[in-house]
Amino acid sequence: MAAALDRRRVAITGMGILGALGDTFEDVLSRMREGETGIGPIGRFPTARLHSGIGAELRTDKAATFFTEAQRQKYDLCAQYAIMAADQALRDSGLPRGPAKGTRMGAALGTCNGGILSLEAQWTVTELDDERTGRYPFYQQGDDVADYFRLNGPVTTIHTACAASGNAIGYAYDMIRWGYADTMLAGGSDPLSHAVYAGFNVLRALNPAPASPFASHFGLSLGEGAAFVVLEPLERALERGATIYAELCGYGLSNDAYHETAPDPEGRGIGTAAAMALRHSGVSPSQIEYINAHGTGTQANDQAEIKGLRSVFGERLDGIPLSSSKAYFGHALGAAAVIELTTSLYAIRHGLLPATLHYDEPRAGCEGLNIIANDMAEGKPRFIMNNNSAFGGHNSSIVAKTSLADDEAAVVSAYNPKRRIGIVGIGAVIGSSVRQGSVSDPIRRADQDAAELPKAGACTFSLKAFDPSRYERRMNRLCQFSIGAVRTAIADAGWADGGQALDGPPERAIGFICGTSRGSTDSIGKFLNSVFMNGPEFASSIYFPYTVINSIAGKTAEKLALGGFSSSLSSGGAEGIMAAAYACGSIRSGVHDRFLIAAGEERSGLSEQIDRAKGLTESRFRPLEGSVCLALTDLDVALQGGQPVMAELQGFGMAYGEGALAAAIDGALTEAGLLPEQVEGVLLDGAGRPGEWEAQLQIVRARLAGPDILIESVNERYGYGESVGSMLALEAAAEWVKPGAMRHVLAIGISVNGNAAAAVIGAVDKQSDEAEEIA
């Protein structure tokens, strides 16, 4: 009998790697035993005019024999690395290389720079060719993995920069715990990029010698590679006799809310993430016996990380074996967390702990630590912690258990699927308008004059005019849209504090999940142009931080003091609903009682070329830019406090590939406990390329079959924006049920590659039975 959702445990049963020390764990461990580093002279691009010329490149071109020539032309190198690592992980797990009949297998891919090499290969940001440009978007990397393995479950690309693969593993863990998937592939991938290397060079972050974290020489060494894990319910893994590398006990996320590139000097962000990981794992600080630290080697990061860990572990930190694996693999950016976690688990399986290479003496702020220096140590810790931090202020922390001995001591973070979630605030920046509490109701005001509606297309909002205290010189437009929408949603919800400081109580913190498929393409284009036109040595330090598209979430968090659970994701069209599902599950898991979910779009010359590559210039809908934010909270808590609740989020479904739309609808109805005929309205968000709307409409009607059901496209009214469209569908659905005209409405988002997400939004009764009993 399957474990109940509220107690489901998750195991790592397969692992795959592609890194500077090798493409099998056997080779990697052998070289780690010898104290080898993968860091050496870079051969992929010239570095003579840069501060450093070293990095951790892959030793062999495995892709040349793994893929056909047609596949190599189809996939960016980021996707190629990911597919090869995921394939190795699946083979290692003993599971089929794709979903078995009647099961749902999904994927969560973490990446810092997506398919940037496909733009870099053209060495221009104008007159781009469609084939290579179509390989660039961040979400394309995760979708390529899903296509290769014919996945049918939730598929998401997490882009929280250097914390991305740690976040991806946590997201995949949640998808299984919450019942959205039976198996998940989770990992990260980033190839070494000339433009990215130039960006770190201009920030003076690179070390001309191989990195030595926590030691006397400052600076990082960039790396590349990919790693993946297979996650499945522990109960099933035990039943089939699978190899269990570890039980994933829990994880934590946070944002420094401090600066786009510099960490909070007090380390409060990583401390918050680590404390959250322990709390939701049911593991005490005294049980952690090894920490694989972020440890980049830069002065600011290493000192801040140790301060953050001391805030959690106190004096006990000095006795815990600790190391950074970046002296082996370089800083593999979005792949760093998963490379470091998997190699730690494999080493521990052989009775060893990774070392910190090139270590001489501790730098200021890192004294007194139990650093595993230069040579691997013997050890078989039961509970370990893996930490990572990123540009944009994002942090991730994972707690894993390496042995199931004495299993009666296991504690599983509680998930309460019956906990109700309400929408209590709406903020939107669309056209020339800032809207609070409502964008516009297409049903109740269907006869209104078109001039009264928020204008689709270009957004003329200025944060400098709206809230000059939060504006910065040269702030990109998408950051402005996001800050404006989120600030307005906070006000609409009555959360006047605008968030909670990092050292505040967890129950008062506000989680923040941002969906963006492209980030600020204007900033990305300007940075790449500085590299391509002026030369890598003259890369723009102003625009480089915004090449990581979690920078939108990071800058919003900084300006609004949102230091709690924090993530940024991409799907190419269903970001709003996926963010809502992630936030609702997190509330039900006790992470925070309050969450903000936002999505946004910015138009630019680069975005227009991506549109052309994706066929969006053929869409029946005009392009849209702007941002929408919803404030979510525990519905019963809100009602008890007298807070107005607009609508209830009752169920979600997420699916990929053939039959994805029907599967997403079915999943949402099942979770909501509804029959198809109980749905009275549908709000559909899709790209609107030739033939798509008609085909999608046919599937929706066949699935719901209600003779009086009203189906409307949010894109007909507002235009199409990859990220913001499904958030508009959620907002409009809340408008439909708010006056009581409808009881249940379905919001649907469909991506450009066939990723589908659906949500049931319901009218709110005055109080639930549980609320009445408490009252």
Image (cartoon, rainbow, N blue to C red):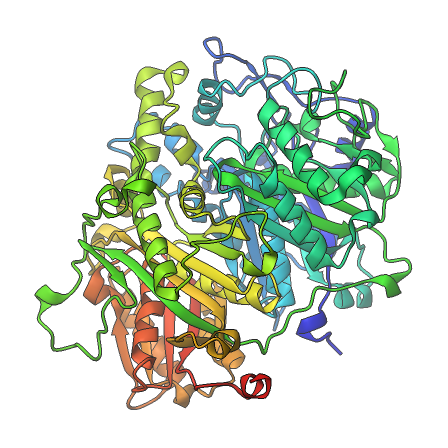
Which residue occupies 72% across, 53% down? Answer: 278
- 727 above or below 311? below
The answer to whether one can see residue 67 in this image is: no
91 with respect to 54 (left or right): right
Q: Quadrant of the N terminus?
A: bottom right
Q: Indicate the quadrant where residue 508 lies.
A: bottom right
Question: Which percent across, then down, holds residue 11?
Answer: 74, 58
Residue that extends furthest to the top in the rendered view of this protein: 48
Q: Nearer the viewer, residue 774 or 99?
A: 774
163 with respect to 630 (left or right): right
- 159 above or below 200? below
115 with respect to 585 (left or right): left
Q: Nearer the viewer, residue 593 or 495?
A: 495
50 with respect to 126 (left or right): right
Question: Which percent across, then down, holds residue 192?
Answer: 52, 28
Which residue occupies 78% across, 63% down? Answer: 411
- 457 above or below 78? below
Number of labels in the image equals 0
Q: Indicate the quadrant where residue 546 lies.
A: top left
Q: Quadrant of the C terminus?
A: bottom right
Question: Which percent across, then down, holds residue 592?
Answer: 56, 61
The answer to whether one can see residue 314 in this image is: yes
- 684 above or below 399? below
Which residue occupies 44% across, 32% down? Answer: 117
Q: Nearer the viewer, residue 598 or 697?
A: 598
